[in-house]
Each structure stands twice: as structure tokens, then as C-alpha cells.
Image (cartoon, grey):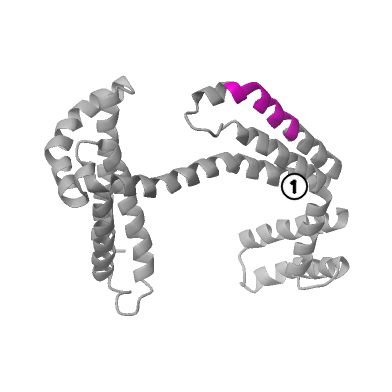
Amino acid sequence: MKKSVLLILGLLVSSVILSTLVYAAGTGTNSMITSLGDIVTSIYNSGVEPLAKFLIGDQSAGDAKNFFTLILMLVLLVSILWEITERVPFIGGNSWVQFIVSFGIALISIRFLGESGNAAWFQTVLLPNQALGITLLCIIPFIIYFFFVMDVGEKSPTLSKILWVFAAVLFAILYLTRVDEIGALSAGKFNPANVYLISAFASFAFLVFDGTIRKWRKKIIVEKSGKSTVRQAELEIRRRLAQLPADVAAGIIDPREADTLKKEYQKKLAYLAKV
């Protein structure tokens, strides 16, 4: 991507930051941010807002939150369309043509959403992104804990079961103690505290199927080695481990990569030996 294209994207991102400061100034979120926001509010009102109204529709005008969201959507669309147009034979390879096509299509889409009469479409597009963000934020800690328990299970299957019991009990306690409090804050029919209950059931399920999951992981390791049995997989991994010094000497891989592969192979051998 050419420097000029990066400059334009940088200006878009700067507009996002500017709109955030203006929004903070309007809500009085923080005294320091508010003071800084007061300085840039006049710049936003006199320059950015009219430009936003012209480019991305009436809905962005006078509402820094909508402007922030629409600019982010525009940046995302330009980025995705850039990757797509790069694969088009008569467009890819010419950065300016790629940018014009990508930015033009993205701007047309965002302007449609930015018109005041299309507020329903704006919320329709916004809702799945909000749902995705909430889902990821809720599930990522559980995924991290899952892989932590799996790593512990390679050394001590009993300890991994204890950890799943601990997680199930903890999530159940969180649900029982917070369900009313969180439910009172929720305006909808779904109580977000139910996420704790779902996590408790998921932890219990992983406890029950802990052995099955470890066997499944062992099967994957065996299949990746290109062999059909655990013993054959162990021998193949040992061959690869013994071949590393020769690969480093031949310049096929560097020492740092060899150390990484060595640790990976040793970890797989230890896992195959205990499961």
C-alpha cells in the first residue's frame, strides 16, 4: 500500500479519535479529556462535521458516536475490499486503482447507512457486530482457561479434572450470587448472568469428557505425524528431533526456529507418553 493511501487511512483514524474526544467532552467523562475535548470541539463542528455530513450522510452530523461508528465501518470495508481487489487481475497491482475502487464502494455503502432515513439499517448492521464483540469478550477467558487446563492435563490428568470441578463450582456460585443484581441492570428478557450458568454447565461437560478430549488430542498428534499408531508417531517425532542439528548446519532453519521445534517435539513426546 502506498504512503499516500496510508496517509488517507491515517486521517480517517484521526477523525475517529477526534470524534471520541468530542463525545467525551459532551458527556463529561473525564476532566482532562473534557478540557482537551473543548479545544477540538470547535474544529469538529466547523470542519469535520460538515465534511462528515457531505461524505457519509446526515446521521453522522451532530452525533460523534455515530460518526465514530461509521468511520470505523468505512476503515474496515476499505481494508477488506483492498484485499479482495488485490486478487482481481485488472485491478490488483495498481495501488491507486485499488484504493479508488475500495474507497468508492465502501463510501457508497457507508453513505447509505449514514442517511438519517436509514437509521434502522444502521442499527441492523451495528447489532451483529455488537453481538460478536460481546460473544468474544465472554468466551475468550473460558478458551484461555480451557487450553491452560489441557496443558496441565498433559502432566496430571487428575489435576485437570480438579480444575474443571473448580471452574464449574465457581461459575455456579457467580450465577447464584449475581443473577438478581445483573438481571436488574438488564433491560431485555435475557439475563446476562445466564452466561455464568452456561459456563458452569460447559465446565461440567469438559470434566465428564476430559479423557475423551485428551484421546482426541493424541489422535490429532498421531495423524499430523503421518503415522497410524502412537508408537509410530513417537518414532517419527524422534527422527525429526534428531534431524534438527543437521538442518541447522545445512542452513535450512535457523537456531531459534530449531529451539522452537525442539520444544514442540519434546512436548508432543511427553504428551504421547502419558496419555
Q: In the figure, is residue 143 to the left or right of 17?
A: right
Q: Residues within 10 Å of mark 1 (few under 14, many from 20)?
A: some
Q: In the figure, is residue 41 to the left or right of 207?
A: left
The residue drawn where x is 76% and y is 32% is 166
Q: Which x, y percent locates residue 98?
A: 28, 68
Q: Which x, y percent locates residue 14?
A: 26, 44
Give the magenta part as a residue range. Answer: 168-180
Magenta residues: mostly which secondary structure? helix
Q: Which x, y percent locates residue 198?
A: 66, 38
Q: Which x, y percent locates residue 108?
A: 24, 59
- Seen in the picture, residue 128 relative to 166 is either above or below; the reply is below
The residue drawn where x is 32% and y is 44% is 69
Q: Residue furthest front?
A: 189
- Which quadrant: the N terminus? bottom left
- Identified by mark 1, the residue type is Met
The residue drawn where x is 69% and y is 44% is 146
The answer to whether residue 169 is magenta is yes
Question: Can residue 91 be spotted in the picture?
Answer: yes
Instruction: Decide which of 247, 65 is in the foreground and name it.
Output: 65
Q: In the figure, is residue 10 to the left or right of 127?
A: left
The answer to whether residue 2 is magenta is no
Can you identify the residue that label 1 sits on? 150
Quarter where residue 267 is shown: bottom right
Question: Can residue 3 be spotted in the picture?
Answer: no
The residue drawn where x is 24% and y is 36% is 63
